[in-house]
Image (cartoon, rainbow, N blue to C red):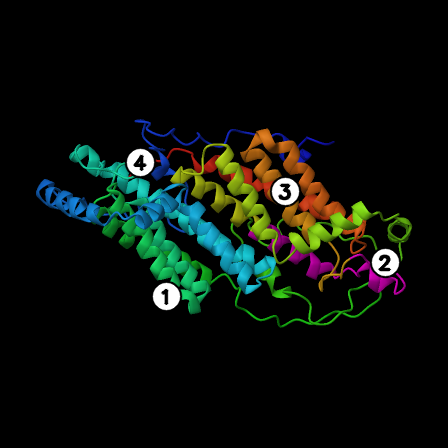
């Protein structure tokens, strides 16, 4: 029914953390974030920093910040505002999305790379908040009330500087993914950290410690990425037989073996087999596809979900949905919370793709146009097996997860998830049972993600 969660996740609706602190708030920002559950680190305290400098060094750093204030040109102030307006994970997510789109990455690789970046940034914020609240170093304007600050002084402790932590993580991970762009990423990371000094909201030692911490987190994230099997070639073969997919060069069959983030294995939620090609159910589905009366509206929706937000752009679409919701719910500038949402979204969607591909290359279901050579589709059929429908796997996972994280928008999000799957039937490239299986798989992945989100903030003993 429109506006309701699928049964597998209906019981798991919960509030996903506090909103960001309002401008000028004196309340601490997510003081328990250092205890949140991590992805690639053993805990937030794994790389706890040594104590910040003493008072004598701090007084000297105040002098450095006063000197830097002379460089606050109008252009510099614009860059300060650009980096400060949103949380680091939000801003670096934009960078990864732009790079992925420019590189023409398909969904499997796009989600995988975004998951590597965003889980690293999520862990980086947990690690930063662990050190922040271990030492509670005051911000420069608190130490020296006369210091002019550009923008807003964050309500969190100063050491380490979270933008510097995130910048170091992002530059390393982005360079790992797009090595030819290393110089650009290094320049952006340097600017992100330098703007915090020009703004007067962090000490030089905060920035240096943040960069060191970020490099440690990035190394752990890249080590995991190098072992996730995404660089392994496919060594299988296309099985022959009636009712089986019969194309050439199938898309990413090896993605069925990649290392998962929240699932125990790629096949944990594998759906049951699709209807046999010679069954009455399959015949009825094919007849329904032939009989479907296409309209300009259904064709437009089919084209939209294929071209505008299809396999080469669906990671951009759903990350942009999450970004807008973070803004509307007042969480876009909350560094730990934004990183947490984006890490969970991208890891979950990477797993949705892995699980979907596991089923596709287990069953090798024939596509409608292959079964009936006279049948015509609205859009070209993707070059991989039919069951389950990838759009349903990806979009419904995103829709259900985001609906739970941002419940005021649940009805709209779920409608988008349903339309994404239905559009593949309207286009003639999937059977209804492909979409139903994809949505059922998505519901189970989303439910697991929501369980993970509940555990994220379970209190642990600070070491």
Q: Is residue 111 above or below residue 402?
A: below
| 64 left or right of 445 in image | left
- Graded by Cα atoms within 10 Å as few (under 14), some (14 to 19) or many (20 or more), the crowding at tag 2 reads some
Residue on which disc 1 sits: 183
Q: Which mark is residue 154?
A: 4
Residue on which disc 3 sits: 444
Name the spot of residue 190 as percent of width and height, x first.
Answer: 31, 56
Give 211 or 149, whichever is nearer the viewer.
Answer: 149
Residue beneath the point at 23% across and 50% down: 71
Give 212 or 442, whichever is nearer the viewer.
Answer: 212
The CA span between labels 2 and 3 is 26 Å
| Chain-order first, disc 4 or disc 3 | 4
| 117 left or right of 357 in image | left
| 249 left or right of 52 in image | right
Magenta stretch encompasses residue 289 = no
Magenta stretch encompasses residue 360 = yes
- Graded by Cα atoms within 10 Å as few (under 14), some (14 to 19) or many (20 or more), the crowding at tag 4 reads many
The CA span between labels 3 and 1 is 41 Å
Label 4: which secondary element: loop
Give 106 or 5, whichever is nearer the viewer.
Answer: 106
Residue on which disc 2 sits: 277
Q: Are marks 4 and 3 in contact (CB under 8 Å)?
A: no
- Give the residues drawn in magenta, as a range: 350-378
Name the spot of residue 173 as percent of width and height, x first.
Answer: 41, 59
């Amino acid at each position: 029914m429109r506006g309701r969660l699928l049964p597998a996740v209906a019981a798991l609706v919960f509030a996903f953390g506090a909103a960001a602190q309002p401008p000028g708030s004196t309340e601490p920002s997510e003081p328990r974030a250092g205890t949140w559950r991590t992805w690639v680190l053993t805990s937030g305290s794994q790389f706890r920093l040594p104590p910040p400098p003493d008072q004598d060094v701090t007084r000297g750093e105040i002098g450095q910040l006063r000197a830097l204030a002379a460089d606050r040109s109008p252009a510099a102030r614009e860059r300060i505002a650009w980096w400060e307006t949103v949380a680091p994970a939000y801003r670096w997510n934009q960078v990864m999305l732009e790079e992925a789109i420019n590189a023409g990455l398909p969904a499997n690789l796009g989600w995988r790379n975004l998951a590597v970046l965003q889980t690293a940034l999520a862990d980086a914020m947990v690690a930063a908040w662990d050190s922040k609240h271990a030492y509670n170093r005051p911000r420069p304007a608190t130490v020296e009330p006369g210091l002019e600050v550009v923008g807003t002084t964050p309500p969190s402790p100063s050491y380490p500087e979270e933008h510097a932590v995130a910048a170091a993580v992002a530059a390393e991970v982005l360079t790992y993914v797009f090595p030819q762009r290393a110089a650009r990423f290094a320049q952006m990371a340097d600017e992100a950290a330098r703007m915090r000094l020009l703004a007067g909201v962090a000490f030089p030692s905060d920035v240096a410690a943040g960069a060191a911490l970020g490099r440690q987190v990035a190394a752990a994230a890249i080590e995991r990425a190098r072992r996730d099997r995404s660089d392994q070639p496919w060594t299988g073969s296309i099985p022959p037989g009636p009712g089986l997919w019969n194309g050439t060069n199938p898309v990413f069959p090896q993605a069925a073996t990649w290392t998962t983030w929240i699932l125990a294995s790629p096949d944990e939620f594998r759906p049951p087999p699709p209807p046999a090609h010679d069954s009455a159910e399959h015949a009825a589905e094919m007849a329904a596809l032939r009989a479907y009366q296409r309209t300009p509206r259904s064709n437009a929706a089919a084209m939209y979900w294929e071209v505008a937000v299809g396999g080469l752009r669906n990671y951009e679409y759903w990350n942009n949905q999450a970004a807008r919701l973070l803004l509307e719910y007042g969480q876009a500038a909350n560094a730990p919370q934004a990183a947490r949402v984006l890490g969970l979204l991208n890891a979950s969607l990477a797993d949705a793709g892995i699980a979907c591909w596991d089923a596709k290359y287990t069953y090798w279901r024939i596509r409608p146009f292959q079964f009936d050579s006279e049948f015509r589709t609205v859009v070209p059929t993707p070059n991989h097996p039919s069951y389950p429908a990838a759009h349903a796997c990806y979009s419904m996972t995103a829709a259900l997860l985001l609906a739970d994280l941002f419940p005021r928008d649940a009805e709209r999000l779920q409608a988008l998830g349903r339309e994404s799957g239905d559009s593949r039937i309207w286009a003639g490239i999937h059977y209804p049972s492909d979409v139903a299986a994809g949505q059922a798989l998505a519901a189970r992945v989303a439910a697991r993600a929501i369980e993970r989100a509940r555990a994220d903030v379970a209190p642990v003993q600070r070491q």
